[in-house]
Amino acid sequence: MPKLTIVANITANPDQIDLVKTELTKLIKTTLAEKGCLQYDLHQDNENPAHFMFFENWETRELWQAHMENQHLQDYKAATEGAVAEFTLFEMAHIQ
């Protein structure tokens, strides 16, 4: 089975950009150390600073699902409650 690619788009409320950016940045080091995490890159839109995007690669979907249940992700959700306007997530497979 091919690795799992995740593209997660997070849009912060305009008055909460710095908070969301700080909390998203906190996820990187811990997530990169997780079993199965191959890549975990955070990006910020040059035109719309409220838009963030994680580009992730995982060995398997099961390992990514375990990541989604980890405490640091729960802490992020609690810290940014009410600060995120929109969240979309795509599970993707590399074609070529």
Image (cartoon, rainbow, N blue to C red):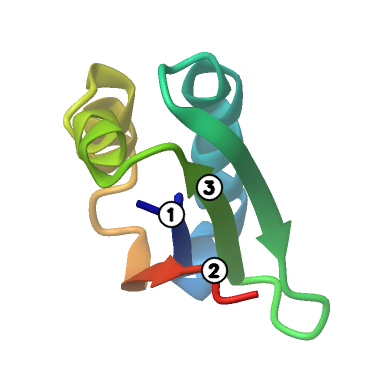
In the rendered view, tell whether residue 4 sits above or below residue 12.
above
Distance from the alpha carbon under mark 3 to that under mark 1 = 10 Å
Q: Amino acid at mark 2?
A: His
Q: Earlier in the sequence, mark 3 or mark 2?
A: 3
Where does residue 56 sit, x and y in percent of width and height?
54, 50
Q: Earlier in the sequence, mark 3 or mark 1?
A: 1
State the residue position of label 2. Answer: 94
State the residue position of label 1. Answer: 2
* In-front residue for pair 56/44: 56
Q: Amino acid at mark 3?
A: Asn
Relative side of 74 to 39, left or right = left
Q: Residue at x 58, y 64 (%)?
A: 53
Distance from the alpha carbon under mark 1 to that under mark 2 = 7 Å
Q: Residue at x 35, y 64 (%)?
A: 84
Disc 1 is placed on an element classified as loop
Relative side of 79 to 51, left or right = left
Q: Residue at x 23, y 23 (%)?
A: 70
Where does residue 31 sit, x and y in percent of width and height?
48, 25
Q: Amino acid at mark 1?
A: Pro
In the rendered view, tell whether residue 91 sits above or below residue 77.
below
Q: Quadrant of the C terminus?
A: bottom right
